[in-house]
Image (cartoon, rainbow, N blue to C red):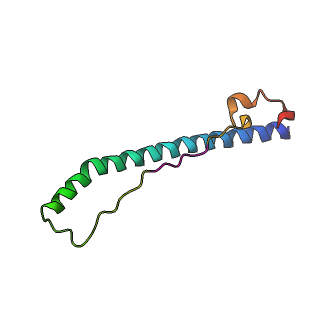
Amino acid sequence: DLGAELYKRLSTVGEHFSRLGTNLRKTVESYNDSVGSLERNVLVSARRLKEHGVSTAGKEIIELEQGSIAPRVLQSAELFPEIAGELPLSSV
């Protein structure tokens, strides 16, 4: 049946997007953790070296921004396999 096949495919795509969103969130969290560690640990030492007259070769260390963009959360029930089968086709 064409409707059942379409629902199955939408469910699969929903699973892919859900995993993608989760991985994007984890990536941003890891990036933020790395920026925090760099600022707390590495850049503090680099600034002290500069204060003690160590040559910077005319270079400045740029500031990194914290990532604050979060992926949009999927909310359509049709995209979740565990509940997609419970919906009547007329609710699509």
Residue 63 on image: x %, y %: 35, 59
Residue at image point 42% right, 51% down = 66
Residue at image point 21% right, 72% down = 57
Q: In the shown orientation, is residue 36 left or right of residue 46?
A: right
Is residue 26 highlighted in magenta? no
Q: In the shown orientation, is residue 24 left or right of residue 32?
A: right
Q: In the shown orientation, is residue 65 left or right of residue 76?
A: left
Residue 73 on image: x %, y %: 62, 41
Report the label total: 0
Residue at image point 77% right, 38% down = 7
Start and end of the magenta stretch? 67-72
Residue 43 on image: x %, y %: 26, 54
Q: Residue furthest left?
A: 52
The quadrant of the rendering that contains the N terminus is top right
Q: Quadrant of residue 88?
A: top right
Residue 67 or residue 14, whichever sits in front? 67
Residue 74 on image: x %, y %: 65, 40
Mainly helix, strand or loop, the magenta region? loop
Residue 18 or residue 9, whichever sits in front? 18
Q: Residue furthest top?
A: 86
Q: Residue furthest front?
A: 51
Q: Quadrant of residue 72?
A: top right
The quadrant of the rendering that contains the C terminus is top right
Residue at image point 54% right, 40% down = 22
Residue 1 or residue 27, whichever sits in front? 27
